[in-house]
Amino acid sequence: MLVGGQSLTAWVQHYQIQLPPFKGPYLTADDDFLATRADAALLPITTMRVTSGGVLVRDCRILLARRRADREYYPGAWDIIGGHCREGESPQAALAREMNEELGIEVLRALEFGVFSEPDPARYGPGKHHMFVATQWRGTPFNTCPEEHDEIRWFANRDLRNLLLASPAYVDLLQQIMVVGASEVQP
C-alpha cells in the first residue's frame, strides 16, 4: 500500500508513528497479502457474528432465558433464545435448530421481527442479530441447555422493565413483539 508514493510501513517509520502492539495476523485493505507489523496494526480485520434468536408469545406473555453467569456474551442477563448461525445456515434454519436444541420444541411458524446491530460492539465485537417471534410450535418448552441458561420464564409486559436484559432496547422491542405475537398466535 502506498502513501504519498512510499509504502505505508516506510511512511509510518519516517514519521515515527507509535503503533499498538501487533495482534495479527491481519490483512491489508487490499486483502491480498499478509501485512507487515506496521501495516497490520492500522488495518485489522474483524469478523461479524451473525445470530438468530426468537421469543415465544403465549397468553400475552413472552418466554425469555437467563444466561448463566459464566457465559461469554451477556452473562447473567435475560435474553431471547437463540445462537450463532452456522456457516451457510439461514437465520430461519438457525432459529429452528436453536429452539429445538435449547427449548426442545419444533417451530412451525415464525415471523422475522427485525435485524439489529450488536448493542455493545466495543465489548463483544460487531454483530448482526436476526430476531423472530415464534407464533406456532409443537412441544412444551423446557430448559434443555442448563449449561447455557440458569432458567427460562414467561414474562408479562409489566415485568420487562425490572429485568436485567441483554440490551436496554429490548424492553420496547419485546413489548412490540408481544403485540405482534399476540395477534399472530395460532393454536
Image (cartoon, rainbow, N blue to C red):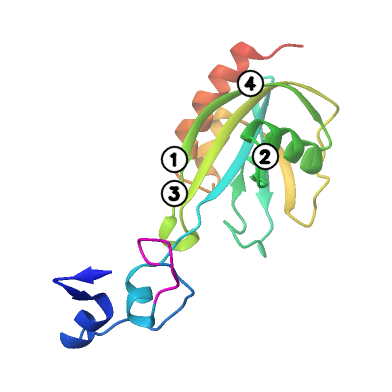
Q: Which residue is mark 2?
A: 89
Q: Amino acid at mark 1?
A: Ala
Looking at the rendering, which quadrant does residue 187 occupy?
top right
Residue 164 seen by the camera: no
Pinpoint residue 19: horizontal percent, then vertical percent.
30, 82
**Magenta stretch bounds:** 28-35
- Of residues 187 and 14, the one nearer the viewer is 14
Judging by the rendered image, the residue that carries numbered circle 1 is 169
Amino acid on which the number 2 mark rests in the picture:
Glu
Give me the residue at 55% from left, 18% from top. 180
Residue 34 on the magenta span? yes
The residue to which callout 3 is attached is 119
Decide whether residue 149 is among the magenta residues. no
Mark 2–mark 3 Cα distance, whole angstroms, equals 23 Å
Q: Nearer the viewer, mark 2 or mark 4?
A: 2
Element type where label 4 sits in the image: loop
Q: Does residue 177 appear in the picture of this structure?
A: yes
Q: Does the CB distance between marks 3 and 4 fall below 8 Å?
A: no
What amino acid type is highlighted by mark number 4? Cys
